[in-house]
Image (cartoon, grey):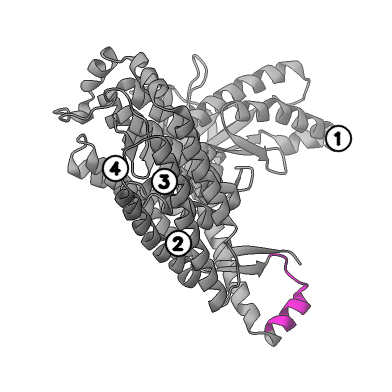
Amino acid sequence: MASRTIRTNPAALRWIRAAFVASALAAALHTLPFYPDWIAAVLAIAVFALALWTPAVALLIAVAALAIPVAAADFVAGAALCVIGFALAQALASREAAGSMALLVTLASLPFGAGFAGPVLAGYLFGLKDGPLGAGLGAATAIVGGALLGVSRVGALLTGAATDPVISFGSPPKDPLAFTWLSESIAHAEPARMLHALTSAGPTWVLVAQVVVWAIAAAAASWLRGADRNGSEKLRALAGLLLLTLALAGPVGAVWRAADAGVSFADLARTTGASLVVVAVAGAASEWLFPRVTVKTEAAAPERAASSLRAKEADVDELLRLIATAEEELASRHTRIAAVMLTDLKAFSRMTERLGSVECAKIVQRHRDVLLPIIERHGGKGKPTGGDGLVAAFDSADSAVRAAIEMQEAIERLGGEISVPEALAVRIGIALGEVVVDAGGRPFLGAALNLAARVMGLADGGRIFVSGDVAHALQSDELLHSHGERDLKNIARPVEVFEVLWKPGMEPQAIESHGEEERTSGPEPVSGPDA
C-alpha cells in the first residue's frame, strides 16, 4: 500500500506560513520610506489573508508592493524586480509554494545576523527538491540587491559592490499613491548604471561560490529530514543541523579571507552563534511541535478497512491525518476565485430527435473542437460537461468575456458551414466567485459554477449573460445591457444580470418573469444608459 509523509497540525502551519510572509513584507516596507503607515499595514494584512489560502497570489502581491518603491528610486531596477519577482513567484509556487518559502527563509535570516541558518533551514524544512533551489536563489537575490544598494556585505554574504548605489531611498514622494513620481523616475532611468553595478561587482568567483555553498548546505540539510522519529532520533537530527551550521562557517570564513573582505573573526563568531540559536529553535519546533509522519494513501476494501479500524485504534489517527491533509490541499490548491463560464447548445434535444444520436454527436464534437481552443487561447481551463455544454474557469472577467465573444463569432461561422435543421446557437453564462477546480484548473463545483448555470438559464441561443460581479469587474468597454436584479432558483439573494451585446446592432433579449423561473422571449429595444 502506498504512503506519503506529512506534518502534523497542518492548519497551524498554514497560519505560521501566512504570518511569516506578512511579517517579512511588513519589515521590508518599514525600511522603505514610501508608503504611509496605514497603507503598509493594509498590504501586510491583505498578504496575510491571501497566504492562508493562496500563497502564490500573496507572493505576487508582495513582489508588486516592493517593486513600486524600488521603481520610485530607480525605474529600471523596479521594473526588473517586478518581472523577475513575478517569474520566480510563479515558478516556485508549486507544492504549497515551498520553493518560494525556502527563498524567503534564506533572505529573512540575513538582516538578523543569522545568515547561516537560512540555507540549513531551507533544505531541512522544504526538502531536496525545493530547499537548494530556494537557498541558491535567495543568496543570489541578496547579492544582487546588495550590489545595487552599494553595500559590500548583506549579512553573511559578500556582494562585491564597487560603485555608488544604483538604488538610493531618499525622502518619499509627497503623494506616492498619485504616481506623480513615475514620470520623473522614467525620465532619469539609466539602464547602463544597473548593468555596470552588476558587472563590476566582484570578484565573480566569490559571488558564484557563495551561491553554490548555500545550495550545497541546503542539500546536505535535506538529508536530515525524517518521519516517525522517536525522542533520541529527533535529538540526533537536531544535533546534525547544529553541526551542519557550524560546518558552514568554515567555507564562508575561507571565502571572506580569500576575498580580503575585511570581515573579522568576531563577526564570523557572532553570525555563527545567532545562526545556531535560530536553527535550534526552528529545528526543535519542527521535530516536536510539527513532526513528520507517514500515512497510507490507498484505502483498503470497505470491510477490511472497517475491521482494521475497529481492531487498531492507531489507524484512527492516520485517518484523521489524511482528512486534515485532504482539507488543507482542497482549500489551498483547489479552491480559488475565478470567472466561471458555462455553455449550452440551443434546442439540442429537438436536434437529436431530428438528426439521430450519431449525427448529433458529430455536431457536438465539432463545436467542442472549435470552442475549446478559444478558451485556452484566452487563458481559460475548460472541459465538456458530459452533454452538449462546456465549462471553463478564467483568471479574470475580461478574459472570460473576450473568450465568450470570440466563441459566439466562431459558432456563427460554423453554423454557415454545416447543415442542420435548427440554427446552430450557443448560450453562455458567466459568473465570478469561489470555485473548486480539478488538477487541470477546470471547474469542478462551487458557488460560482451554480450561479453561472442560473445566469445561463436566462439566455437564449447566441446570447452572453453575465452576473453583476462580472460586469463590474470588466476593464474593457464591452457594450452591456442590464436586465436588472433577478430572483434565480436556489440563489439566496437577487442577482443583477447583464447581457453582453457582442456584435454591432444587436438588441438585448427580453426576459419575462414567470414565478421562480425566468422565461425568455424575443429582443427588446435598447434604451437608456445600458444600451
Q: Which callout, 2 or 1, points to the residue nearer the camera?
A: 2
Residue under circle 2? 13
Task: Work out whether mark 4 precedes mark 2 in sequence or the reverse, and give the earlier one.
Answer: 2
Q: Which callout, 4 or 1, points to the residue nearer the camera?
A: 4
Q: Which amino acid does label 1 sit on?
A: Val
Residue 484 seen in the figure: no
Task: Work out whether mark 4 precedes mark 3 in sequence or the reverse, and give the earlier one.
Answer: 4
Task: Work out whether mark 4 precedes mark 1 in sequence or the reverse, and give the earlier one.
Answer: 4
Residue 344 seen in the figure: yes
Determine contact: label 4, label 1, CB under 8 Å: no
Q: For the residue labelled by badge 1, is the local secondary structure a helix, a strand or a loop?
A: helix
Q: How far apart are marks 3 and 2 (CA)?
A: 35 Å
Relative to 89, is 436 above or below? below
Who is closer to the viewer here, 510 or 459?
Answer: 459
Q: What residue type is labelled 2?
A: Leu
Q: How far apart are marks 4 and 3 (CA)?
A: 28 Å
Q: For the residue labelled by badge 2, is the local secondary structure a helix, a strand or a loop?
A: helix
Residue under circle 3? 253
495 is within the stretch colored magenta: no
Q: Which amino acid does label 3 sit on?
A: Gly
Residue under circle 1? 358
299 is within the stretch colored magenta: yes
Q: Where is residue 180 in the image (x, y as percent from the top left)?
A: 20, 21
Q: Which callout, 1 or 3, points to the residue nearer the camera?
A: 3
Q: Write the start and end of the magenta stretch as one range.
A: 297-309
Residue under circle 4? 28
